[in-house]
């Protein structure tokens, strides 16, 4: 009888400890889930800790992309030399890569903040042509990598 009371107190203490550890885990960067289970008062106690990390999947722009079959209805000037420019959108945002130099053109890819892209020409409306024939808005490009 005394052994059963001691075992029940140990189980109760472990459950309280588990709740306390779960509360602490909420404040950490890596979410943790802790559970305690018991099959009977005199059997062993099993504690399981599972750690998971949040992941973000990005659509990455990389060429060559599908053929650019848009009819050209704009003027563009070739740059003196191929240049590397950096995407300056806000953190967590993306810059669309399009078939033509307008937001109405179909999207073929996306750039994330700080991602480099090679450009070879600039259009009269401020868009840049990439090395593989697609376009990105010059409003969100810079020659300096964002910090």
Image (spheres, rainbow, N blue to C red):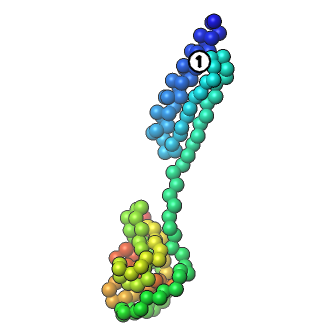
Quarter of the rendering containing residue 103: bottom left
Task: Note whether residue 117 is visible.
Answer: yes
Examine the rendering and report whether any part of residue 144 can be seen. Answer: no
Q: Quadrant of the N terminus?
A: top right
Q: Residue, x 52% and y 55% (percent of image)?
A: 55
Is 63 displayed left or right of 144 in the figure? right
- 144 w.r.t. 130: above or below: above
**Quadrant of res 44:** top right
Image x and y of residue 96, in percent: 42, 74
Residue 75: image quadrant is bottom left
Q: Tell me the residue at 51%/73% (across/down).
A: 61
Question: Which quadrant of the rendered structure holds the C terminus?
Answer: bottom left
| Closer-to-camera residue (46/138) | 46
State the SS at label 1.
helix
Hey, which residue is sitting farthest top in the picture?
Answer: 1
Residue at horizontal 46 percent and vertical 33 percent from the top: 23
* Residue at the right extreme, as displayed: 43
Question: How far across and how far down the image is residue 89, in percent?
Answer: 38, 68
How many tags in the picture?
1
Q: Determine whether 2 is above or below 115 in the image.
A: above
Residue farthest left in this picture: 125
Q: Position of residue 7 (x, y in %)?
A: 62, 15
Reply above or below: 24 against 1. Answer: below
Residue 100 in the image: x percent, y percent? 40, 84
The residue carrying pointer 1 sits among few (fewer than 14), some (14 to 19) or many (20 or more) residues within 10 Å by Cα, namely: some
- Return the residue nearer the eye: 45 or 121: 45
Residue, disc 1:
10
């Amino acid at each position: 009888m005394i052994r059963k009371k001691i075992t029940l107190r140990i189980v109760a203490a472990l459950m309280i400890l588990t709740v306390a550890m779960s509360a602490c885990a909420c404040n950490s960067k890596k979410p943790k889930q802790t559970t305690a289970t018991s099959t009977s008062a005199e059997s062993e106690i099993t504690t399981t800790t599972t750690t998971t990390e949040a992941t973000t999947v990005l659509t990455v722009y990389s060429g060559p992309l599908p053929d650019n079959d848009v009819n050209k209805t704009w003027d563009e000037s070739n740059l003196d030399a191929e240049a590397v420019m950096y995407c300056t959108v806000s953190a967590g945002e993306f810059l669309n890569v399009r078939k033509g130099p307008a937001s109405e053109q179909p999207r073929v890819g996306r750039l994330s903040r700080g991602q480099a892209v090679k450009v070879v020409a600039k259009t009269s409306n401020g868009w840049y042509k990439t090395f593989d024939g697609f376009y990105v808005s010059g409003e969100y490009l810079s020659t300096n990598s964002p910090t």
